[in-house]
Structure formats: structure tokens, C-alpha cells
């Protein structure tokens, strides 16, 4: 999947990947896609839950062990 921006959260544990995701998403434009790289498998639950809570569109994961690539699209403001 093609992303406009990537957050590299490899090597850090929950909740840091979601904190960094939220910070970066605030600076993105509506409709842009964010890729989150993580090695903590908690991202598999955390990213979809964060998207539901914030209204951003969860686009799915690509799993390429040991890295999880999560994708979300910024909601219309």
C-alpha cells in the first residue's frame, strides 16, 4: 500500500506507537494515508481501536515479520 507519511515506531512498546501516530496524524491533510511501522504486536489491537475511537479509517496491516505495517487514512475534518 502506498502511504503519504510513515511513522517509524520499531523498537518501542505500547502506548508509544499510538502516541506518535496521533501526533503525526494531527499534521496531515484530510485523506492522506499514514503507515505505522511497529515491532510490538500490540499494534494489531491498538491501531484499529484508535481508528474507531478517533474516526480515522483503518486500512489494514501488512505483516512482514518482525515488522507490522499498519495503515490509516485521515478522516475529513
Image (cartoon, rainbow, N blue to C red):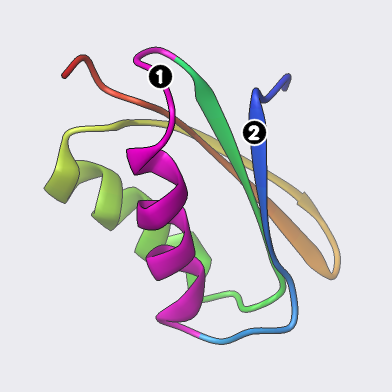
The residue beneath circle 1 is 29
Residue shown at the point (39%, 55%) measured from the top left:
23
x, y percent for residue 1: 72, 22
Res 2 → quadrant:
top right
Element carrying mark 2: strand
Name the dominant secondary structure of the magenta segment.
helix
Reading the chain from its start, which is encountered first: label 2 or label 1? 2
Residue shown at the point (64%, 33%) measured from the top left:
5
Which residues fall within the magenta stretch? 14-31
Horizontal arrangement in the rendering, residue 72 relative to residue 26 (left or right): right
Give the answer, above or below, for where 58 lies relative to 12.
above
Residue shown at the point (26%, 56%) measured from the top left:
49
x, y percent for residue 15: 40, 80
Element carrying mark 1: loop
Res 76 → quadrant:
top left
Determine crowd level at label 1: few under 14, some 14-19, many 20+ residues with C-alpha closer than 10 A: some
Q: CA distance from mark 2 to mark 1?
A: 11 Å
Amino acid at each position: 500500500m502506498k502511504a503519504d507519511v510513515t511513522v517509524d515506531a520499531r523498537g518501542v512498546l505500547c502506548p508509544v506507537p499510538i502516541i506518535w501516530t496521533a501526533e503525526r496524524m494531527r499534521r496531515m491533510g484530510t485523506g492522506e494515508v499514514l503507515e505505522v511501522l511497529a515491532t510490538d504486536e500490540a499494534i494489531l489491537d491498538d491501531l484499529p481501536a484508535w481508528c474507531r475511537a478517533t474516526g480515522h479509517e483503518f486500512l489494514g496491516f501488512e505483516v512482514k515479520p518482525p515488522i507490522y505495517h499498519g495503515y490509516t487514512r485521515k478522516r475529513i475534518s
